[in-house]
Image (cartoon, coloured by chain):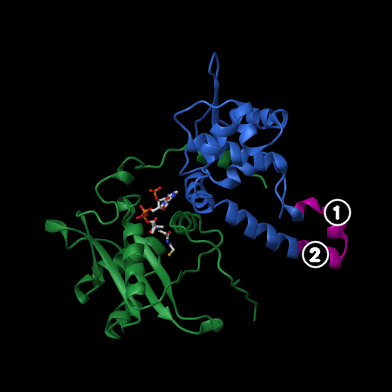
Chain colours: A green, B blue
Amino acid sequence: MGDFEGAKKRMHEDLPTSSAAQGPHRTGSPGLHIRPATRADLDQVIALDEEVTNIAKPDYWRSLLDRRPGPEQFFLVATEAGASAARILGFMLGEIRAWEFGSEPCGWVYTLSVREDARLHGIGQALFDAMSDEFRKAGVSKVRTMVGRDSRLHMLFFRALGMMAGPYIELEKEL
Amino acid sequence: MKLQISSQLAVFAVLELYARREEQLSVAEIASKYEVSPHHLAKVMNVLGRSGLVRSVRGAGGGYQFAGNARRTTLLDIVELFENAGPAARNDEELAERTGEGRALLQVMKEIDDIARSTLGSITIATMKRLVAQHEVPGKTASALGAGRG
Ligand SMILES: CC(C)(COP(=O)(O)OP(=O)(O)OC[C@H]1O[C@@H](n2cnc3c(N)ncnc32)[C@H](O)[C@@H]1OP(=O)(O)O)[C@@H](O)C(=O)NCCC(=O)NCCS
């Protein structure tokens, strides 16, 4: 299995802002505001997405809002409350999909990013909780996502929120 | 995938020490809760001690204390201290590499290993503690059991 040194290092590294993680931004805290995205948010969302993924896709993001997210699609952003409310700290996309792969309707979480300087303050979790509320209101009782096996950060994040492997396995083939 | 007994003992001991991190627990105490050999557990605790995940406290009332970072340490970090290889590597690599059949079987076993690694590597001690809570029988909490037998 290997990578002993890496593992040892991780075990003793402190989370960068571990004390702040219990701080003012925890889920439901008054310091954080979660709301549906609007056209005015687009530039910041596009910039944040490019920062995280290194690929700029302005047309994709515009088309999401042009389509006007339907009742089954959710595009949420997190901002600070009050004076700095215009600054977007993170965003999440979600959608309810039905009968794909024979599955009953369930909520899918895809694309989630939190600004690097705002991570480990509970913003990702707050977005996930808000998305889960939307899904529940829409009548579904399960949330799913797809994570790269090597995508450590997303894996740790979704696991920390209690997600476990579902009954499907993604298969693929070179064409 | 099956974990070695040592890995299982290590995971149990770390979880118990983390759950009761204000206390110092003796090997006998931990062994009796999980009904395992104190002798085997003592060896496991030595390895955990060397890794820095637990600290041994000397003197009267001495024992072991959790010393790691529960939100950073994953099950893989613990298990890797005791297992050198997943099932794919446990197969005879030389035998496997010799033929097409061997290489094909190796590919299949590696797929299993990759998933196992990714699963173990994404579940931290803190996440595991929450999972344990879901599996606990009401009225029979870990510490209650431990206290009853310890
Ligand atoms: C994954 C991500 C959304 C998490 O957002 P966040 O706001 O930092 O997450 P939270 O603070 O809500 O964390 C919730 C839990 O996830 C886990 N977690 C999050 N970041 C972690 C890290 N770096 N290491 C270990 N666990 C972590 C923790 O258990 C945390 O709870 P805790 O702080 O109480 O222990 C954020 O890191 C991100 O946007 N990363 C970019 C991912 C990326 O590279 N994307 C590119 C491809 S799309």
Q: Disc 1 on helix, strand or loop?
A: helix
Provide the major secondary structure of the magenta segment: helix
Asked if residue B45 can be seen in this view, the reply is: yes
The residue under label 1 is: B94
Amino acid carrying label 2: it is Leu
The residue under label 2 is: B105
- Identify the magenta region: B89-107
Where's residue B76, x and y in %?
A: 60, 47
Q: Relative to residue B133, is residue B13 depicted above or below?
A: above
Amino acid carrying label 1: it is Glu
Residues indicated by labels 1 and 2 sit on the same polypeptide chain:
yes
Residue B63 has which mark?
Answer: none
**For marks 1 and 2 on the same chain, the one whose residue lies earlier in the sequence:** 1
Quarter of the view holding residue B40: top right
Tally of numbered tags = 2
Q: Relative to residue B124, is residue B99 depicted above or below?
A: below
Q: Nearest the camera: A60 or B143?
A: B143
Image quarter in which the N terminus of chain B is found: bottom right
**Residue lying at 22% horizontally and 70% vertically, measured from the top left:** A41
